[in-house]
Amino acid sequence: MPTELIPFDFEGRPVRVVTDAQGEPWFVAADVCAALHLPETHKAVARLDDDEKARNSIPTPGGEQEMTVVNEPGLYSLVLGSRKPEAKRFKRWVTHEVLPAIRKTGRYVLSGTPALPAPTQDRVCSILLIGEAVAKVPGVKPGIAMAATLTCIQENTGLAVETLRRALPARDTAANEAICSLNATQLGRLLGLSAKATNQRLARHGLQFRNERDEWELTEAGEAWAEAMPYSRNGHSGYQILWNPAVAERLKEVA
C-alpha cells in the first residue's frame, strides 16, 4: 500500500493515518483503539471484515514497524464497539474535521504549526506529537519538553529556531501584546548596567526571583513584562527570560 503518513491529535492522543494511492485514509488501529478506550486492539480488529483492515509499514521513532490499519468503514465499526462517551466525540471529530481536511488538502495540519512544505510539515507534526506526549508525563515541565522537541525538529529539518518557536503554545500574558526580545545583557545596555546588576534590579522590584535550581524565574508581576522561553543547548534544557524593552523605562523610574 503506497502511503503518506499524516499525524494528528484527538483530545491529546496521537492518532496516525496513512493515505493509499487513491487518497483514501487508513487509520492506525492501535491509535484508534486507544482513543476509544478499547483495551485489546487485537480482539477489536479481529471482529472487522477482511476488506476493513490491512497491514502497513508505519514510520516510528524506532524505525519502520508493521501495524494494522483500518479504513473508514472499519473505523466506524470500531467506534460502534466502544460504549465510552469519547466514541461519539471521536466520530464527530473524524467526520466533521479530519476527513474533510484530508480530502480537501491532502493532509491534516496541527493548529499552531508554521506553514511548511508537505514532507517537512509531516516530520514536524510527528515530532510535535511526541513532544506533547512527553510534556504530559508527571514531573515533566511542558516548556522544557517542548524546548527539547524544538531542538529535535531543528536537527531533523534544519529550520531556524525562530520559525520553530511559532509552533509553541502561546502564553496568555500581557507580554504577548508586545515583543519580548531582550535578555538581561541587552536590557542592561539600555540601563547602563551589567547583566548581573540588571538581574538584581529586576529582582528588587519583584519581577523575578531565584528558584530552587538557582535560576531566574518570573514572578506574577514579571509575566506582564517578559516571557520565559524554553531552550535546549548542549544537552541541557531550561528557560531564558526575554524582556519587553518597555520595562527599561519602568526600571529607570524606580531606580
Image: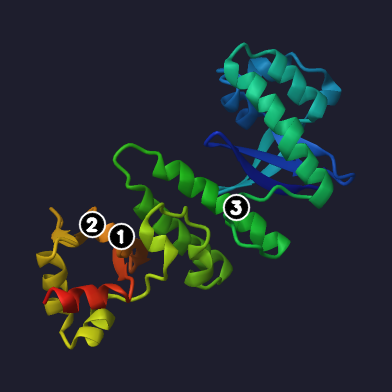
Image quadrant where one finds the N terminus: top right
Which corner quadrant holds the C terminus? bottom left
Separation of disc 3 and disc 2 at Cα?
A: 34 Å
Q: Amino acid at mark 1?
A: Ala
Seen from the viewer's position, the closer of residues 168 and 128 is 168
Mark with earlier residue (3, 2): 3
Q: Are marks 2 and 1 in contact (CB under 8 Å)?
A: yes
**Residue 209: x percent and y percent?**
14, 60
- Answer above or below: position of 167 versus 160: above
Q: Nearer the viewer, mark 1 or mark 3?
A: 1
Residue 196 lies in quadrant = bottom left
| Residue at x 42% of width, y 71% of height | 179
Write down the residue under mark 2. 221
Could you tell which of marks 1 and 3 lies nearer the N-terminus?
A: 3
Does 145 sit left or right of 55 as displayed?
left
Of all residues shown, which one is farthest toward the right?
A: 22
Q: Is residue 233 visible?
A: yes
- Camera-side residue: 94 or 179? 179
Residue 19 appears in the picture as rendered: no
Q: Residue at x 37, y 53 (%)?
A: 143
Label 3 is placed on what type of residue? Cys
Q: Residue at x 72, y 32 (%)?
A: 94
Q: In the shown orientation, is residue 230 left or right of residue 55?
A: left
**x%, y% of residue 137?**
37, 38
Q: Residues within 10 Å of mark 3 (few under 14, many from 20)?
A: many
The disc label shown at residue 224, or none: 1
Whole-percent x and y of residue 147? 40, 59
